Image (cartoon, helix red, strand yellow):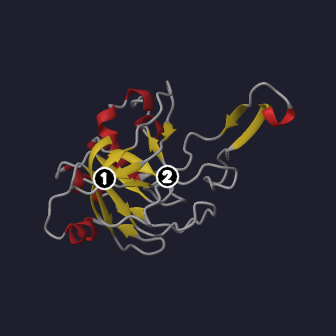
């Protein structure tokens, strides 16, 4: 009998203690009605940045006139995926040769998630996380990669203003998934399920990102 398929939840818990980029809107919950107070139902209002936890960046986030998150094809965020462990170090850059070594001669899946280990605590914003070298993106795209995911808040450095890795993704048509939790996930092949919400006109969407074994 085949072993049951295993699920890995690669999304951080969403709560008031989750770190966001400095100056962005942290998550807060206002309880309007509460059964614990004798109300018939519990009813909450949520306020937060859409770049919250595990999230999809829409091209409109970094490209004027580019597609918003509701216009992205869902199939980008559902399907064959590869988790690769790469070493870039604090304030480092993940380069094509780092990924090539992690692939060990194998072709990449259409969706590649890069485990850098450089942002270990989603509750503490540390700005020295590893980013992606812009030259990595066309290298991935030329090999059929449609989505790149990272276990950090951004594919670019925290203090970047020109966002070269984002710009490279826009030019290559590669989608971006940020804020993943990959520390407990073995490297290898999976099915990715990380569907964004259908937020009309928005520049990003939180996702419940999950990996499923073959």
- The answer to which of 63 and 76 lies nearer the viewer is 76
- The answer to which of 200 and 167 lies nearer the viewer is 200
Q: Is residue 79 above or below residue 101?
A: above
At which x and y percent is residue 158? 53, 59
The circle drawn on residue 142 is none
Q: Is residue 173 above or below residue 39?
A: below
Q: In which quarter of the image is residue 151?
A: bottom left
Mark 2 Cα within 10 Å, few/some/many (few <14, many 20+)? many
Farthest residue toward the front? 1
Q: Which residue is drawn at 43% across and 47% down?
A: 209
At which x and y percent is residue 69? 44, 32
Q: Distance between the residues labelled 1 and 2?
A: 19 Å
User: Relative to 143, is 190 on the left or the right?
Assistant: right
Which residue in the protein does label 2 denote? Answer: 11
Which residue in the protein does label 1 denote? Answer: 5
Q: Residue at x 51, y 30 (%)?
A: 202
The mark that comes first in sequence, 1 or 2, is: 1
User: Relative to 18, is 53 on the left or the right?
Assistant: left
- Is residue 152 shown to the viewer in this render? yes
- The answer to which of 94 and 120 lies nearer the viewer is 120
User: Relative to 65, is 41 on the left or the right?
Assistant: right
User: Relative to 159, is 74 on the left or the right?
Assistant: left
Q: Which residue is drawn at 49% across and 38% down?
A: 204
Of discs 1 and 2, which sits in the foreground?
1
At which x and y percent is residue 75? 29, 35
At which x and y percent is residue 54? 49, 49
């Amino acid at each position: 009998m085949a072993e049951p398929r295993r699920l890995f939840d690669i999304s951080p818990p969403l709560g008031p203690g989750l770190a966001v980029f400095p100056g962005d809107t942290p998550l807060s919950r206002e309880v309007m009605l509460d059964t614990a107070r004798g109300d018939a139902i519990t009813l909450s209002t949520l306020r937060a940045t859409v770049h919250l936890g595990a999230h999809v960046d829409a091209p409109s986030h970094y490209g004027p006139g580019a597609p918003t998150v509701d216009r992205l094809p869902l199939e980008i965020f559902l399907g064959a995926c590869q988790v690769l462990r790469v070493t870039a170090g604090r304030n480092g850059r993940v380069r094509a040769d780092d990924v090539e070594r992690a692939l060990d001669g194998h072709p990449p899946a259409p969706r590649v998630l890069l485990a850098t280990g450089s942002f270990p605590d989603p509750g503490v914003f540390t700005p020295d996380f590893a980013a992606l070298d812009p030259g990595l993106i066309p290298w991935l795209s030329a090999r059929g990669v449609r989505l790149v995911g990272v276990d950090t808040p951004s594919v670019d450095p925290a203090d970047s203003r020109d966002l070269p890795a984002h710009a490279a993704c826009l030019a290559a048509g590669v989608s971006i998934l940020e804020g993943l939790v990959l520390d407990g996930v073995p490297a290898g092949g999976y099915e990715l399920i990380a569907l964004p919400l259908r937020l009309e006109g928005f520049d990003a969407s939180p996702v419940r990102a999950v990996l499923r074994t073959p």
